[in-house]
Image (cartoon, rainbow, N blue to C red):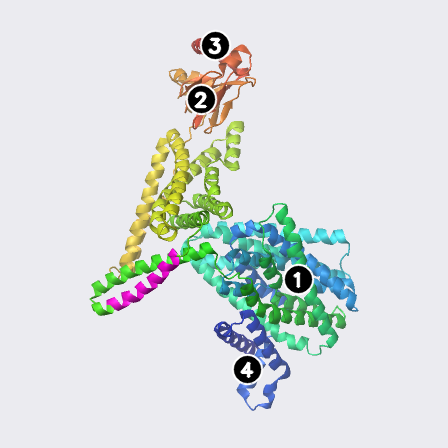
Amino acid sequence: MTSIGLVVFGLVSLLGLMSLLPPLAARLRLPYSVLLALVGLGLGLIVTFRPDLGVPSPALHEIIEALASVEVSSESFLLIFLPALLFETAIAIDVRRLLDDIAPVLTLAVLAVVICAVTVGVALAMVSPFGLVACLLLGSIVATTDPAAVIGIFREVGVPKRLTTLVEGESLLNDAAAIALFGLLLPILLGEGRAGILATIGHFLTSFLGGGLAGFVMGRIACALLSAMGGWPRAEITLTIALAYLSFVIPEHYFHVSGVVACVTAGLVLGSIGKTRVSGHTFEQMEGVWAQLGFWANSLIFLLAAMLVPRIMEDTTLRELGYVAVVFLATLAARGIAVFGLMPVLTRIGLMQGINHRIKTVIVWGGMRGAISLALALAVVENTALPPGLRDFVGTVVCGFVLATLLVNATTLRTLVGFFHLNRLSPVARGVRDRAKLMTLTDIAHEVETIAQAEGIDREVVNTTLAEIERRQNIARSQVQGAELPGEDVVKVALTVATAREIDRCYELLNARIVDRRVAEMLLREAQRVRDAVRALGRPAYLQAAGQSVRFSPTFRWRLALHRRFGFDRPLAAALADRFEFLMVQHRILTSLVPFCRDRLQPLVGEDVTGAVVDLVAARAAIVERSLIALKLQYPAYAAELQRQFLARIARQREGLAYRVLAENQVVSGEVERELRDEVEAYWQGLDSRPRLDARLSAIDLVQRVPIFRDLDIQRQQAIAALLKPQLELPDAVIVKRGDRGDAMYFIASGAVRVLLEREEVELGSGDFFGELALLTGQPRVADVLAMGYCQLLALKARDFQRLLLQDAGLKARIEDVAKERLRRD
């Protein structure tokens, strides 16, 4: 067999072996990573010592030779396998949860790496003949953690989601920090770099932050390309694979920043917003592809790295095993310092929520090392510029340490989790579980009865089956009756379920092409923010977060400032259109949550809690409705057009779905279905383009809407418009404040304002004006003026006031008459 044939044969053999290991690991109750390491060690021993040579079997010889031919360098490990491992974890992680715990994640990922490298380096320098820099290099190698075994155990035993997020988030950035530190120390050890502390720290931060920026930019570019590629799932998934490797190579090679950080950041960007750039089905396919790539990469890198361990540790001495013990204890101490020492400080200064000591202990013990540490050690072993003794020292100690963490920490972690009862449901979760079981069994009993009648099944058989279900119902009912749930905790759980349904509904509307992608992203951000607030603070946070959702964003206010300062209309009109559609769709989603809560939540949490949740959802919907009505009053024609488009999109989606069902039921052929769906798309062409909102913000438009200017000829209107400045005011905005110096008067083109005098309130509407008294008398403002809704005003500055009055005697008389009347009334 040729050399290429042997390599291919060896890789395929390893893939076949990998396919058998997950079920075997489950049967043996071993973490998958531990079993991989053990199998890799066994294969490494066979390849190194060749026991097959004593067996007269050519086929067996070829298999062993094929495995021996699969030799991968450290550079291949990092370039082929590492991007896939990092990217797969990054796109799967919950970014919102990660951001909630970003302080402890960064503490574990960056500060803990430095603490570990220093602790291990100093400890080894004290007991070994090697210098501090060499020992620090070894410390950076063992500072990177491998979450595969830990996460597998966590998912199996059911630990809190937050603990899983902490470990996953740490592993993502931990690899980046450790590899960046390794890349700084290796040139110093070779005499090619500067050993200054400030220079090293500066280089480290530049590499880390620069990699994050590069990954963010590349991730956003990829998301923009995904939006333009809609409808081609294979091409979209291929783009994500290219992104993983390009974001790793380009920043590292061309910009000399961390490719690991860039790859992780690009994956986080894609995982957080990519779901809104592709269809739901495509995103599920993409997750499946990346899960498969991650499985292959993780398994192969573990097997291939473990196969090298027997060769590296072939001549290990007792002294070197002592060094392994020193590293093991030093890493535990360093991790304990980071978790028990730094995290309480972050909690006290308000950067993170508190973590109990049980979870902290599991985090410390769960810091297993894996393939990345082995790959970095292999890079040292392969570097002929380093002394042979140092290469043997690093290779032996790192391999021994990795095996120790897998064989000691990983195999006992499940026991530790059980000892601390972290795998047990909380009382609230148990109560919800029991109610969910009772509700489901009740539904199943009705369905079985219906199906049995339709199929004509013998009554005796039906009764036997229903009796089994009823027995389980009685058990579930007794569990529910024996466990009363604390009220506020149940409300918190119910609100969390309701907000989760809100998020799902946003994705449903987006995938059905009923909601614009940009608006869907706004809705998702808002729903996720409300969910996070509820998780943290419960009921009080729900309406507080709801009130924040109708506030005007900084971006909106920035566009409003552009309009006022420079007269730019388009950005503000686009922001108003976004807000219009956002409020309209959000109100529909919240309204649909009320029947969902009554139908699905009430059997789970009871009538009282459901009533409280329904009241909260209805109150939030009312807040949104008030903001929506204010916009509708100002732009009624646009509101009608948006509603028409919304209904048309629903009609398009339902018609296409109906044709798909006909094809699935073999009523029509696939060709007929495609033709019908193409006809639907052609008929509704342009439906995805949102109608443009005519905000009527130009001065001449507004002048023509003011009664005292309406009857003037066009030349006079244009002359007046040249002196007046359009100004849009938002609901409840303070336009004029009592006591301020008067610098302008205002004509109301549309909308209404409330004038707050000392003894009374006055409402002014379209065609009225205010603020003229301060200009005529030179006195400070005598009232506060607030916008009652959206108001389109025409501002006349003090310097132009006299010019306008001189141009139009009739207007001058009208303003002076109103001013005299107001002075007399005051």
Furthest toward the front, the residue is: 482
Q: Quadrant of the N terminus?
A: bottom right
> Which residue matches tag 1?
143
The numbered dot on residue 823 is 3
User: Which comes sooner in the sequence, label 3 or label 1?
Assistant: 1
Spatial separation of the CA atoms under disc 3 and disc 1: 78 Å
Q: Hey, what amino acid is under mark 3?
A: Leu
Q: Are marks 4 and 1 in contact (CB under 8 Å)?
A: no
Is 594 placed left or right of 414 in the picture? left
Q: Dot 1: what SS?
A: loop
The numbered dot on residue 180 is none
Q: Hey, what amino acid is under mark 1?
A: Ala
Is 770 placed left or right of 359 in the picture? left
> Which residue matches tag 2?
754
Q: Magenta part of the protein: which range?
A: 462-481
Where residue 599 sits in the image (x, y, percent)?
Answer: 33, 50
